[in-house]
Image (cartoon, coloured by chain):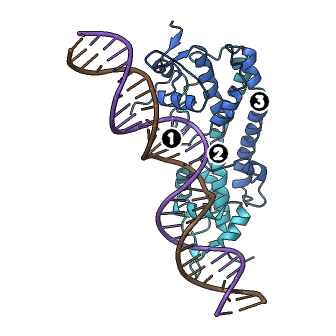
Chain colours: A blue, B cyan, C brown, D purple
Amino acid sequence: MPALLTIGEVSGRSGVAASALRFYEERGLITSERAGSGHRRYPRPTLRRIAFIVFAQRLGLTLEEIATELAKLPPDRAPTRRDWSRLSRGWSERIDHRIAELERLKAGLTECIGCGCLSLDRCKLSNPDDRAARLGPGPRYWIGDRPLSG
Amino acid sequence: MPALLTIGEVSGRSGVAASALRFYEERGLITSERAGSGHRRYPRPTLRRIAFIVFAQRLGLTLEEIATELAKLPPDRAPTRRDWSRLSRGWSERIDHRIAELERLKAGLTECIGCGCLSLDRCKLSNPDDRAARLGPGPRYWIGDRPLSG
DNA sequence: CTACAAGTTCAAGTGAGCTTGAAGTCAAGG
DNA sequence: CCTTGACTTCAAGCTCACTTGAACTTGTAG
């Protein structure tokens, strides 16, 4: 087990494309040392950092938000479990919110779409707060949302 | 209450921007009649159609998928509640799946990130089903998955 | 030494889901 | 008549999260 990993090794282990890793570096989510050749070399803790990034993305955080979180980690030493858990404080609540919305949407399947009350200004599905929460353009996938192509 | 609504009225009632409504029309999700002036006029059932679109988007369907679903509605008459509920058959299960994933992610917050097992190749968050190919931008696979060749 | 794989940078492209801007039309009010 | 405002089309722009391609360098196996 070498102390430093190449971009190819990190990509292979993490499943994150090399181009994505360079992109993350550009955005300040990860850093790399360089070999004499100019090639990137990653310390092992970077793997966990990447795991955190992927995890946070599943929760719907943008890369910018993730970068902000990661910036809270100590720059001078490898993060401890306490460091990591501090970052995810408050995420539970966020997840609960989304679960609650899904429950509401599910109820709406039978109660609203089925029953005929699916009118925009009266249906409880049409929650202004929820819709307002979605700022900006782009695909509005939230936690775990994927096309129902299966 | 007029029989036909202008794009501004529909936008106001639905909370969906006029530009988005035109965009939906371009993509075949909604249709409009035209006044002599060339201005769009929407029959009232279009409001429900739009509600359905917004709803489906919250569930993570793409506009293309939503268009496919909407195409199943009878073209010759206003959809009944039975027509609508037919479309959403099977969505409950999808929602349950997503809720389950969220519960797992939430558990991972304390069990995985906190405890130190957030290692790329062993963490139970790394569920193959969940990280099944998601096309387009964003994280396509989770740790251990091989990139889809091609 | 030659191949060739794997790495580098930088610029441009992709796709979803819109928004914005330009340029023009149309109806109503003063 | 003039203005205002709501509408029209069409093209281009924007965000996010990357990917792809071009042109080039480095590392390694035979």
Residue named by callout 1: B136
Between the residue at mark 2 and the residue at mark 1, the CA separation in whole angstroms equals 17 Å
Q: Residue at the location (52% across, 54% down)? A: B68
Point out residue D25 in the picture as x, y percentages from the top left corner. Answer: 36, 23
Foreground residue, A127 or A63? A63
- Quarter of the image for residue A88 reads top right
Quick check: B118 left or right of A42? right
Say whether residue B121 is visible.
yes
Q: Is residue B60 above or below residue A7?
A: below
Q: Amino acid at mark 1?
A: Gly
Residue at the image position 56 percent from the left and 43 percent from the top: A147
- Residue A67 in percent (x, y) is at 66, 31
Q: Chain of mark 2?
A: B
Coordinates of residue C11 in the picture (x, y in percent): 44, 43
- Chain for mark 3? A
Residue behind mark 3: A92
Residue sitting at x 68%, y 58%: B51
The amino acid pointed to by label 3 is Ser
Looking at the image, is A127 positioned above or below residue A141?
below
Residue indicated by mark 2: B59
The image shows residue B25, relative to residue A18, as above or below, that is below
| Nearer to me, D29 or D12 | D12
Viewed as shown, does residue B116 lie left or right of A89? Answer: left
Q: Measure the C-alpha gap from mark 3 to mark 2.
A: 20 Å
Residues at circles 2 and 1 in contact by the CB criterion of under 8 Å: no
Q: Which mark is residue A137?
A: none
Element class at badge 3: helix
